[in-house]
Amino acid sequence: MTRVRIEIDDRLTDKEIVIRTPVYDADVKRLSQQLQAADKVQPQLRFFKGDTEYYLDVNDILFFETEDRQINAHTVDDIFEIHYRLYELEDLLPATFMRISKSAILNTTKIFALTHSISNSLVEFQHSQKQVYVSRKYYKPLKARLEERR
């Protein structure tokens, strides 16, 4: 049984969350990651298409990908340009996003299928024909992240 206790201490300057547990297991790890992700402020990113500026919810993004020195954000049915580098996005985006290759960052909550073969690994998304490749270096970390979701 999990107990939750909240203590108010007016001497504190920041919030502190302590998890006390007899063992560090998958549930504790997941709880810790959820707390860290919830604490991360959702960035207000600006997306561009032509002369129009868009303010999308980052959770609507399937993946970010570089193409000709430009970063594109892919949604289910559209592509937007964004004025950040991938390494900057890695620091700004919530924990549900992860690097999957030198040229792509993926929203792990949007994955529908992961196909692995000798030559490559391919991610497919639900309700979209879009696909993105996962490099060999990032396949195992992605697979582990997907296993944690279960």
Image (cartoon, grey):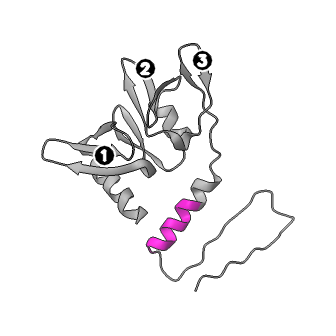
> Residue 33 lies in magenta, yes or no?
yes
Q: Is residue 86 left or right of residue 41?
A: left
Distance of mark 3 from mark 2, alpha carbons? 17 Å
Distance of mark 1 from mark 2, alpha carbons? 22 Å
Query: Which of pointers 1 and 3 lies earlier in the amino acid sequence?
Result: 3
Look at mark 2 in the image and give the residue it sits on: 70
> Residue 17 lies in magenta, yes or no?
no
Q: Give the residue displayed 37% in from the left and 40% down from the top.
A: 128
Look at mark 3 in the image and give the residue it sits on: 52
When the figure is inspected, residue 18 is found, relative to residue 111, above or below; the finding is below
For numbered disc 2, what is the local secondary structure?
Answer: strand
Q: Is residue 142 left or right of residue 56?
A: left
The mark lying in front, picked from 3 and 2, is: 3
The quadrant in which residue 77 appears is: top left
- Which residue is the extreme one toward the top? 51
Distance of mark 1 from mark 3, alpha carbons? 34 Å
Disc 1 marks a residue whose amino acid type is Tyr
- Which residue is the extreme one toward the right? 10
Q: Which residues are magenta?
A: 25-34
**Residue 43: % across, % down:** 62, 39
Q: Give the residue displayed 76% in from the left and 57% down from the top.
A: 14
Image quadrant where one finds the N terminus:
bottom right
Query: Which of pointers 1 and 2 lies earlier in the amino acid sequence?
Result: 2
Q: Is disc 3 surrounded by few (<14), some (14 to 19) or many (20+) residues within 10 Å?
A: few
Disc 3 marks a residue whose amino acid type is Thr
**Residue 57: % across, % down:** 59, 39
When the figure is inspected, residue 127 is found, relative to residue 26, above or below; the finding is above
Look at mark 1 in the image and give the residue it sits on: 138
The mark lying in front, picked from 1 and 2, is: 2
- Residue nearest the observer in this picture, 90 or 130: 130
**Residue 89: % across, % down:** 51, 35
The mark lying in front, picked from 1 and 3, is: 3
